[in-house]
Amino acid sequence: MDFQSLFQQFLSGGGTLQASTYRSLVLFLPELILCGSIVAMLLARLTSLDKCIPTHWFALLGSLGAFIAVLAQFWELSIDGQPSTLLFTGLAVHDEFSVFFRGFLLFFLVFVVALTVLSGIPDQEDAPDFYTLLCGAVVGMMVMSSANHLLMLFLGIEMASVPSYAMTGFLKGRRQSSEASLKFVVYGAGAAGVMLFGISLLAGLTGTAEFGLLGERLHSIFANGFTASHPEARIAILALLMISVGFAFKLSLVPFHFWCPDAFEGAPAEVAGFLSIASKAAAFALLVRFCMSVTGSAAGVVQGLSLTMGLGLGTLAIITATFGNMAAYSQTNAKRMLAYSTIAHAGYMLMAVSALLVLRSTTGSELAASPEQMKQAIEGLLYYLAVYMFMNLGAFSIIALIRNQTFSEEIDDYKGLIQQAPLLAVGMAICLFSLVGIPPLGGFYGKFFIFAAVFDATRVHWFMWVVLAAGGFNTVLSLFYYVRLAKTMCMDVRPVDARQVSMPSNSPSGMYVLLVCGMVLVLGVIIQPLSRVANHAAAAFF
Amino acid sequence: MDHQATGEVLKNLLTVAWLLPLAGFVAEIYWLRWSNRLSKSSALCAVACIGIGFLCSASALVYWGCHTDWAVLKAEEHAEHHDAEVHDHHGEAASAHADPADATAAVDAAHEPLVNGAGHQHAADDHKHDEHKESHANAGKAYSGTFYKLAQFGKLSLSLDWYIDSLTLMMFTMVTFIATCIHLFAIGYMKDELTEEYEDHQVHTSHGHFSRPGRFHRFFSYLSLFCFSMLGLVLAGNIFQVFIFWELVGISSYLLIGFYIERKSASNAANKAFIMNRVGDFGFLIGLMILWTWCGTFQFDNTEAGPGLFTMIRGTDGVMKVSDDGTQVFLQDAHGHRLENDGKPSSIGYLLLVAAGLGVFAGCIGKSAQFPLQTWLPDAMEGPTPVSALVHSATMVAAGVYLAARFYPVFVPEVLLVIAYIGCITLFVAATIALVATDIKRVLAYSTISQLGYMMLAIGVGGWGAGLFHLITHAFFKSLMFLCSGSVIAGCHHVQEMPRMGGLRRKMPITAYTMLIGVIAISGLAIPVLNIGFSGFYSKDAIVASALAYSELNPVHILLFITPLVTAGITAFYMFRLWFLTFYGEPRDQHVYDHCHESPRVMTTPLIALSILAATCAWGWFLTSGAGEEGPLYRMIAFSETVPATEQVKSRGPAQITLPSHQGHHSDVHKVHGQAGMLALLAAFAGSAFAYVIYGARVINPNDIRRQFPQAYDFLVDKWRFDVLYEAMFVQPVHIVSAWCAGFDKKVLDVILHASASITLVVSKWDRLFDENMVDGLVNMVGNTTRSVGYSLKVVQTGRLRQYVMWIAVGVVVLFGLLFTSLPK
């Protein structure tokens, strides 16, 4: 292949659905901007430019620029209404769903950078390292959310994970932090190994690594019904299971959650907040796309596979949510408690994916669920993620802001905080009640949409009733430990020897808390705009 | 369209005049923020607002005149022509249908009934005539539109509208002019309030007199609020808006009467005025509800949405369409056709229309202090005198008359009869009380009530223009007299009792002689043969003439003529009595006389301005030609008459009334005008002469007369014992009923309440036991279980890395095992 033809390919692209390399690069612009700002940060450090311009400006501007680029893409998509485009000869996909998640991640990145600036982690010396890692992780997550290839799947997960390991151990002086980082790395490596094994099995079995083709091949493998009698089927199931372990690791699903409490406790609250939201959102994006790809294609839906995966994920969801809520109860460290809460929320969100797959398994039968119902499952997941972003970020940022003044993250040190910093206490209470799912806060509608999807799925399989009941039961369970924290902050008496905490609402940090908690409230009252955007994003699959 | 453009300009001018006082009110309320209590600037602000308002109103009037080519003043020829035509036509029609019964049977039932001698309507060829009449009745007279739509409830739309015709313009000009004069006067009258420490001599506390900071700015802000409300009432384009401003003038009046709130009498009087007015407003609301239920609109004039109230009831030609049996009135649309609803003609019951009219009139009774709600007005004299002059003589109390006139098209003859009798009773009762009153302001107050009665009577007997004519002239001379009395009171240092005055004309000549002009005007004195007099002469003449024409056509109601005639004499008597007692003769209280002085110029200038108008406002361009009912003032008002009165109108309702015609030289009223005028003049002269004999020349000692008829005297001094009657009829029963209610409350309701409380206590004790043991137990059990499970789960999280990694492998194997066992083979 000479240069001429390479260039020709660069300009024209492969098939009809595949964008040319040039077009791919244009659609890849947000990631490129972020990469550019990483390079700029490193160069600035090299030239000591970071002494005069704080590094966080690079990160902030880079993330804002990338976010605007994504917004432009979203706008373009919503006008064109064109079907999904394959980028880079099918390695990645560009559709409403991936654009939604890339926008989500970048928006969140802006908030995280703002939080780190306010809370002062990292210091100026470490700032370039920290923001490089942060932006790098986000690039990885964006790759995850638009991956359309097993290779990209693995690459994305690893690109997101490796900077996370480093960020977890970012407080180098703290022994606990380093330990948490080490645990995270080793555990992550183990999970990655299993997943890689699964990927190679699947790729070897089907002879392709592209998501679009995987569905067709699996369809032909399970042409005679979904049984484990066939050796190829057995291998396929094992491969899917092992890949799922990789997802379970990223989503901290039980029993692959062990890293999560230790890593969160060791990591700074800002990093914990980042990991709990961003990596989860990216993993859900990837999971939904992966599941939608392997369970069906243009050739048809593998009903048995879809149902089994749906029910399996549903089981995992029940176990995860229940375990997370139960274990959170006995925690004395606020971050650790929220780590378990994060696990539980992953369970709730997994219920939406489970409902989606169960509904999808009916495709082609007379009970067939309408695309609208399936869209609603995805819409519920996306709405939940958006609300979750604000409420979890609010909780972690308040923990970080309190830590800056009391140097403690123990729940006992939060006693009677309302007497000194009412804003923090009330803001925390709003976030906690939203996490429980009490109206009129955003968390209520997130839960409501997901439970509605699960309820839709109950007509397909009785097991979804169990899932629904477990979801409701877990909401009650979660009340105990959330309210306990709220009660500690708002109703207990502050001990006389406790450190002074002050947070006026007109300080930048106070306004940040107001903004984030205000969004939790707003999303519980004004639902239509976000749910329409989520619905639009969900339409990418149908 | 030219008509619309003119309307826009008029609306803009009047809106400025209307809203300026509101701006003034807002500014004056906060005046102390940028000024102090000793500054007169707030008054200047108020005067500026209302003064500019007057300029706007006057220019609106002139603008309107120019744009109609002063057609209003040339209207006579037109009316003449029209009148003749009608008469001719009538003759033809009458000859065509000699037998009235035959006519009734032959024609459309809706067309035939109300108009006696309106046989022309039966003829098939009268189409042209109808059109002619239509143009005469309504078109081109009124301008209307909507400022702002407040709300829409079903088909009911509430909006702020405007309705401008010559009556609106006249009222605006009159109100703003008088208000300007009174504002100026008040600057002088209220100057006592320009102090940090105002001592109220009429309020006694344990430490002597009560003292408070002066409230100069507050007085003027209230006045501005009143002006805004009053102008809004006049400008209003729908009856609901009238009601809103009706209540606003009510509250302004309440605030102003109670201006010296620390005086028990003042606060009582304010309450009395407010409560008495609520009684009337209750009827007003009922009337509104009836009208809305059956007509579905509050608008006066037609809008795009549909016909207005006037058109609905009176059609385009001013004729009500009553059904054959006289029980229904058909509603009409803007083209003279019947309104239909699902193919059936919409109509309103005749008696309902009577009820609606009486309801609205009840509001007028309250506001205009008519019998039987007249008792609040004399007490309202507790307010500062400028208030009495503006609110309680010239404008607000006249608003009742104004509304009755504005709503005239909706009133059926039975309602008009009630209005006439109410006016008749009121004018007599009030005049007799005024005979014996000794407080200078109270005499004027009773005189006001009596004169308002005249206006009501005029409207009731079909003298629409006459009533409003008297409204305007009365506003001038009565506000003049009130200001004079204010000047006297201020000059005599708040002495109001006439027996302590006397001979004051030597000390305060301007006040005395301007007052004399007012007295002559209200008495209706004139130079006999030339028939030249002050304004009151012409307007009273018009009223008495209308009453005479009415009683000639309806001999049963002869009292409606005799009473006002006699009362004209009484009026002249008590007014001259007032003047003689105050200004004439020798001082009866030397102390008062010695300390009294003429008022400063800021107070006398308004007196002179008003006295000029009180004397001349009814005159024509030249003294002799076209005064009174040929004068511009009357024509200007009568131009707006919505119900044509060119022919006699015979009612088919139960009362069998015939309303006299009063337009043109052949009308019933005109025929009796000379005779009525002579009788009225005679009465006035008799009254004045009698007053001179008793109080001027002192030939007869009034005390002798008093001793002669002690019971009658006491009866009058007790104001016909209305207050006693109301005390016995309403206040006492209410006390008794409330005592019963209180007893019931204590003896029965409280017992039930206490019993239920104790039952609740017992139940809640049981409930608590259940709650603490069962519910809490359950919840605690769940909580404790969760807790123990949670603690046991802690064991899994050992923190040992090796174990964690092992779990990955175990997890995969276990899951795989589970999957394979559950999958079908």
Image (spheres, coloured by chain):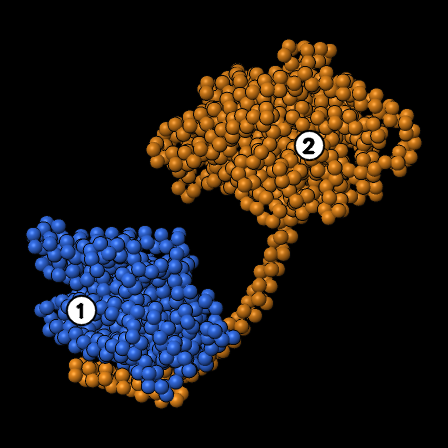
Q: Secondary structure at mark 1?
A: helix
Determine whether, in the image, residue A357 is placed left or right of residue B147. left
Mark 1 vs mark 2: give the one in front: 1
Report which quarter residue A390 is drawn in.
Answer: bottom left
Q: Position of residue B354 (x, y in %)?
A: 73, 42
Q: Residue at x 36, y 84 (%)?
A: B781
In this rendering, would A218 be left or right of A335?
Answer: right
Subunit of mark 1? A
Of the numbered discs in the image, which one, if any, rests on residue B571? none
Tell which of B451 and A330 is nearer to you.
A330
How far apart are labels 1 and 2 at the CA level? 97 Å
Residue at left offset 39%, top offset 53%? A80
Q: Secondary structure at mark 2?
A: helix
Q: Identify the mark at residue B456; answer none if there is no mark.
A: 2
Q: Nearer the viewer, residue B612 or B227?
A: B227
Label 2: how many Cα within 10 Å (few below 14, some 14–19, many 20+): many
Chain identity of mark 2: B
Residue A397, given in percent of the width and then of the height, sits at: 24, 63
Check the rendered structure and report the hue given to chain B. orange
Given residues A473 and B465, the one toward you in this image is A473
Q: Which residue is mark 1?
A: A162
Residue closer to the observer: B3 or A356: A356
